[in-house]
Image (spheres, helix red, strand yellow):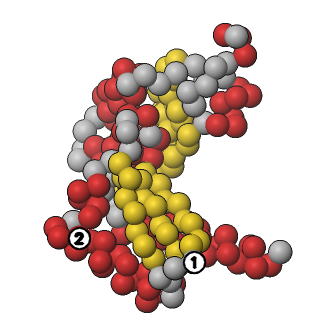
Amino acid sequence: EREFVKQKKKEFQIEEFVSENLNVGHSGTKMQRTPLGEKIIVSASRPGLVVGREGQNIKKLTSSLKRRFKLNPQIEINEVENINLDANIVAEKIASSLERFTKFKGVGHKVMQEVMNAGARGIEIIISGKVPSARAKSWRFYQGYLKKDIAIEGVRKAYKIAKLKSGIIGIQVRIPPEIKLPDEI
């Protein structure tokens, strides 16, 4: 039992490390144990930027994983099919546009419309912090379905932060899964 907890803790630390190093369109990281070592599968919106020129970023990441976690990693990169249906990439897009001082309401509505046009059943975006003024406030943008019971189980969630002059802004994105709802059957 302790070994299992220790192993999961190590996997979480590796995922955090990979997401910190690959901040360009990083969606998620999965680990698989193989007889030769560990296979790390990275999902990204733009795999070319993750790999880098002549695989430079991957070599750097592999060597740092060997040093820090004493692994023998084989890194595999998958492309995300639809970037507008991935909650992590959508949250990252909102954070980067807020850091470029664009108007937060415009960003929220624009991204929400892009996600709905991509074929999502619904979306909820919560931007909280000192966005328009010196006082902290939460702004909620939502559209479409966010059913309770099913949405809680399979909903794709992402939490990101944007660092502005006024302070840190929290961004939450929820996109429900593509499944048949009970009221449609």
How far apart marks 2 and 1 lie (CA) works out to 24 Å
The residue indicated by pointer 2 is 55
Residue type at mark 2? Gly
Mark with earlier residue (2, 1) = 1
Residue at the front extreme of this rendering: 35
Residue 1 location, quadrant:
bottom right
Q: Residue at x 28, y 34 (%)?
A: 103
Mark 2 is surrounded, within 10 Å at the Cα level, by few (under 14), some (14 to 19) or many (20 or more) other residues, namely: few
Residue 35, label in figure = 1
Q: Tag 1, which secondary structure?
A: loop
Q: Residue furthest right?
A: 1
Q: In this image, 170 relative to 89: left or right? A: right
Q: Nearer the viewer, residue 11 or 16?
A: 11
Q: Tell me if residue 167 comes above or below residue 83 in the rendering.
A: below
Is 177 drawn above or below residue 15 in the view shown?
Answer: above
Quick one: quadrant of the C terminus?
A: top right
Where does residue 121 sit, x and y in percent of width and height?
52, 21
Front-most of 97 and 57? 57
